[in-house]
């Protein structure tokens, strides 16, 4: 335990005395300050908050990702290359303690540096009185279930390409699953569409003084600038929709009458044109939660956890490879993890059926699947939209990204370290 | 008879390239024993396999074949390493740490409690005459001062076996004499010392027994007192005098 603490202490001292950590703190705070003047907003509080979170805090986070990868890949690699690692390895210290101590130091320094811009965001932006919202989506069958239902009709459809029909069932189901995720629902004039939100009725009875909101993202079928008009009803709550753009519409719901026993939210189109939306992504029920400051704190936990995972990954790469190679691999992996899933999702169906392209897609999907736990939670877009980063998600990210995955990576680092000696 | 502290049996080390083809046979079937309380010198010309042998003893390199034991344990065993002090050929210090912090760091790696670590740090800084500059970063130290810090950090865990790789490398004559005196004093107190050196006069002064390595094999082994001639003459007789060096022909 003493040796672990000493390895941790040495790495922290190295990061502080080499000016890495102080420079990052100054750069982070400087950018958060400059963002108030550099970023152009739509002059509303919401617009300013969105820009500050996405590009202010987001910029700092990107900077820290680069800094953490650069430092962590060198933590073991540069010590090995300078032969200082030998002096540690001849002491009664386990290789795991070396890897774990270095990881903890890098994670602690990254978390400390990130705390400054997060605190600056709360203090300087004046948003601390704002409330974030829990976000609920309607209960729908899973994309997989919908894909299975679509399969027979798709195969029987004469317009389906013969090349696609030759592909395996798994490939076709994957194509259909993607279509199901993007499935649009059309609501014509004077039509009503309904979606179920389980537990909404019980919640509204338990919280009679709290008024929820509904959020829609409409896509008009013919003209993006057509006005959308409609009425929303949800278990005794009502709201009116009226907008002239296709951006998200958040409608406060006011309690008008009691006694409905439904978990249903419905939208009636009273505009002149049909409207389209994707129920899985475009219909949300918002319930007021706690303050912006608490939301920043939970986002901070999630972001610090992601940085910790990067640190553990960097230490592992630096243990196995020389520093330049480790750094290169780290950044390539980061790019694949960030861009791979969207590339895979946007691939045309015909290419999905080509053997070579399918191999490339499989690799991208495999990398995406491996990186799923860390990237499953994206705190910045939620924070920017005032959506609540749920405590269980933040804790889950902490457990997986800060504890479990780094333990596994540190064990692997230790094995490689012993193997390399 | 007491078990030797260091024991190498038929140890070989072959370095290989990326395709696993052998490139260098650094050590070839070496047998070696270091007994408790002796000062053992491992001598040899450059490339004779001294450093490779020491690295294998310390568990920093795995032997290709043969068996190595340190205090009767495998070299990477924590219990064996707890009794070990190592001074590498170059000091390899962390430049941003002060002399005191460096010793406290290595004391921590030896799991010494903080109070004990402080006491030993003070004693060792006094011993290597660096108490006055204990709060200065070692990155600004001269080679000799850095060497003394490295020597002190090798001694911080009160090792039973001290492995010194070229201990007087980079030291001025006064410091060299001090190191030799220190090694003799440590040996008198019962510490086992294993040292390598190119400076045969130094080895002659401090070693009880030596082994001369040449091309990874033991060329000779014995007590210094029983050599019957100076260590230099003995050494040159075993590994070649160097008279056949072709520089003169080249220059002519």
Image (cartoon, helix red, strand yellow):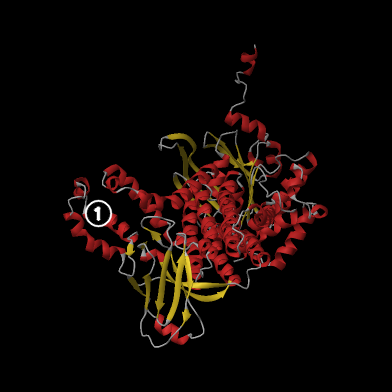
Q: Is residue A246 left or right of residue B86?
A: left
Q: Nearer the viewer, residue B62 or B134?
A: B134
Q: Which residue is situated farthest in the front direction here?
A: A272
Q: Is residue B67 above or below residue A291?
A: above
Q: How many marks?
A: 1
Q: Nearer the viewer, residue A200 or B50?
A: A200
Regarding residue A92, the answer to whether it shows in the image is no
Please report, as a chain letter, where disc 1 is located.
Answer: A
Q: Is residue A359 left or right of residue A86?
A: left
The image quarter containing residue A181 is bottom left
Regarding residue A368, the answer to whether it shows in the image is yes
- Residue A410: give x, y in percent of width and height: 50, 58
Looking at the image, which residue is at 32% across and 63% down?
A186
- Residue A75: give x, y in percent of width and height: 58, 51
- Residue A85: give x, y in percent of width and height: 59, 50
Q: Is residue B39 above or below residue A127?
A: above
Q: Nearer the viewer, residue A70 or A291?
A: A291
Looking at the image, which residue is at 61% across and 21% down?
B245
Q: Is residue B151 above or below residue A398?
A: above
Quadrant in which the C terminus of chain B appears: top right
- The crowd level at tag 1 (other Cα within 10 Å; few <14, some 14-19, many 20+) is many
Give the residue at mark 1: A172
Q: Which residue is situated farthest in the right direction here?
A: B132
- Residue B233: give x, y in percent of width and height: 65, 30
User: What element does badge 1 sit on?
Assistant: helix
Q: Is residue B177 above or below residue A341?
A: above
Q: Nearer the viewer, residue A93 or A267?
A: A267
Quadrant in which the N terminus of chain B appears: bottom right
């Amino acid at each position: 335990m003493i040796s672990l603490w000493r390895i941790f202490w040495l790495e922290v001292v190295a990061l502080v005395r080499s000016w890495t950590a102080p420079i990052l703190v100054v750069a982070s705070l400087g950018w958060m300050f400059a963002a108030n003047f550099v970023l152009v907003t739509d002059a509303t509080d919401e617009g300013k908050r969105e820009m500050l979170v996405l590009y202010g805090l987001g910029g700092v986070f990107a900077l820290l990702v680069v800094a953490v990868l650069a430092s962590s890949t060198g933590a073991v690699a540069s010590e090995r290359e300078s032969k200082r690692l030998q002096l540690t390895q001849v002491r009664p210290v386990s290789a795991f303690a070396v890897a774990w101590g270095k990881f903890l130091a890098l994670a602690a320094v990254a978390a400390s540096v990130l705390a400054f811009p997060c605190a600056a965001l709360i203090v300087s932006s004046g948003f601390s009185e704002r409330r974030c919202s829990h976000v609920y989506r309607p209960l729908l069958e899973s994309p997989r279930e919908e894909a299975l239902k679509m399969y027979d009709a798709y195969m029987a459809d004469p317009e389906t390409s013969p090349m696609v029909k030759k592909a395996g069932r798994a490939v076709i189901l994957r194509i259909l699953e993607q279509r199901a995720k993007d499935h649009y629902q059309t609501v014509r004039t004077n039509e009503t569409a309904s979606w179920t939100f389980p537990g909404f009725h019980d919640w509204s009875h338990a919280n009679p003084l709290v008024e929820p909101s509904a959020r829609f993202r409409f896509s008009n079928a013919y003209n993006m600038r057509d006005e959308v008009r409609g009425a929303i009803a949800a278990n005794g709550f009502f709201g009116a929709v009226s907008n002239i753009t296709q951006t998200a519409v958040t409608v406060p719901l006011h309690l008008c009458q009691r006694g409905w026993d439904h978990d249903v939210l419905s939208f009636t189109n009273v505009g002149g044109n049909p409207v389209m939306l994707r129920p899985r992504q475009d219909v949300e029920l918002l319930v007021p939660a706690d303050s912006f400051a608490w939301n920043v704190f939970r986002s901070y936990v999630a972001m610090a956890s992601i940085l910790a995972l990067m640190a553990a990954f960097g230490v592992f790469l630096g243990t196995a490879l020389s520093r330049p190679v480790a750094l290169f691999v780290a950044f390539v992996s980061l790019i694949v993890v960030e861009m791979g899933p969207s590339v895979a999702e946007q691939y045309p169906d015909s290419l999905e059926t080509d053997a070579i392209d399918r191999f490339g897609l499989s690799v991208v999907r495999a990398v995406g699947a491996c990186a799923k736990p860390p990237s499953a939670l994206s705190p910045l877009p939620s924070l920017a939209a005032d959506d609540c980063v749920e405590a269980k998600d933040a804790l889950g990210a902490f457990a997986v990204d800060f504890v479990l995955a780094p333990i596994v990576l540190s064990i692997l680092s230790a094995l490689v370290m012993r193997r390399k000696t | 008879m007491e078990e030797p502290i260091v024991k190498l049996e038929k140890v070989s080390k072959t370095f290989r390239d990326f395709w696993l083809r052998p490139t260098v046979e650094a050590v070839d079937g070496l047998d070696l024993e270091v007994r408790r309380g002796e000062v053992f010198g491992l001598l040899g010309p450059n490339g004779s396999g001294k450093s490779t042998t020491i690295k294998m003893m310390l568990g920093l390199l795995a032997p290709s074949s043969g068996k190595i034991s340190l205090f009767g344990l495998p070299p990477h065993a924590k219990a064996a390493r707890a009794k070990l002090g190592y001074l590498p050929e170059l000091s390899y210090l962390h430049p941003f740490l002060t002399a005191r912090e460096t010793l406290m760091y290595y004391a921590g790696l030896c799991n010494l409690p903080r109070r004990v670590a402080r006491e030993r740090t003070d004693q060792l800084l006094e011993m290597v005459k660096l108490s006055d500059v204990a709060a200065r970063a070692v990155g600004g130290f001269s080679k000799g001062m850095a060497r003394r810090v490295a020597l002190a950090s090798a001694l911080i865990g009160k090792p039973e076996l001290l492995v010194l790789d070229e201990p007087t490398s980079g030291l001025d004559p006064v410091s060299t004499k001090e190191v030799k005196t220190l090694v003799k004093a440590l040996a008198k107190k019962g510490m086992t010392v294993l040292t390598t050196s190119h400076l045969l006069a130094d080895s002659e002064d401090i070693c009880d027994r030596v082994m001369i390595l040449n091309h990874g094999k033991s060329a000779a082994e014995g007590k210094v007192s029983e050599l019957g001639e100076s260590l230099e003459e003995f050494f040159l007789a075993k590994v070649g005098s160097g008279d056949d060096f072709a520089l003169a022909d080249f220059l002519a």
